[in-house]
Amino acid sequence: MRSEIVGTTALWIMLGVAFVVSFSADRATEKLKEVMSAFLVVLALQCLHFAEEFTTGFQRLFPPRLGLVPWPDSFFVIFNATWLCTWALTAAAILAGRSSRLVATPVWFLAFGAIANGIAHPLLSLAAGGYFPGLFTAPVLGVAPVTTSPRQRGRNRTTLQRSGA
């Protein structure tokens, strides 16, 4: 159990930051419907990322990098499935018009986690001297929250209009 708790500490810290951001950001809930398409894209990419991690043994190779014992497959699947379900329920709540600061927390957590994956997996691969589980999907996942955000799409549209495209 120590391995599971210590090995996921960074994620729990990220969740805490997402909670603070959700409750401190002005108009945190007003924009939730606007980010729904981006949220769903990132969620789909997270599903692919989890599948890559699981099939290539992330749960066995990552914990030893921290001096911990490998995680049981059951822990890794339940942990990830719980978050995937939480994010799916979050999307359903937002689409049903049930936005709140608490509902915004998983949205921020997914965005922060995606960006962190985009940074961490290439670094883990460099440290491993080659492929490390999750590397193929991590870079796409890492840039998705930024490139699919409504603000970024608006900038892209403006740039295309200015260039005459």
Image: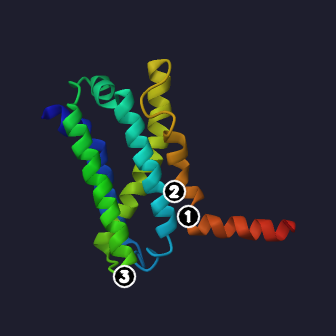
Mark 1, Cα crowd under 10 Å, few <14 / some 14-19 / many 20+, is some
Look at mark 3 in the image and give the residue it sits on.
97
Give x and y (percent) for residue 107.
Answer: 38, 63
Query: Which residue is pictured at 18% across the width and 39% down the height?
Result: 5
User: Cα distance, mark 3 to mark 2?
Assistant: 22 Å
Look at mark 1 in the image and give the residue it sits on.
149
Q: Residue furthest left?
A: 1
Look at mark 2 in the image and give the residue it sits on.
145
Give x and y (percent) for residue 115.
Answer: 47, 48
Direction from residue 163 to residue 1 in the image, left or right: left
Cβ atoms at labels 1 and 3 below 8 Å apart: no
**Disc 3 secondary structure class:** loop
Give x and y (percent) for residue 57.
Answer: 34, 27
| Residue 22 visible in rendering | no
Q: Amino acid at mark 1?
A: Ser
Picture quadrant of residue 27: bottom left
The quadrant of the image that shows the N terminus is top left
- Taking depth in this image into account, of 20 and 37 the one nearest to the observer is 37
Picture quadrant of residue 63: top left
Q: Amino acid at mark 2?
A: Pro
**Disc 2 secondary structure class:** helix
Up the image or down, 14 lies above or below 32; here it is above
Mark closest to the chain's N terminus, 1 or 3 = 3
Direction from residue 143 to residue 9 in the image, left or right: left
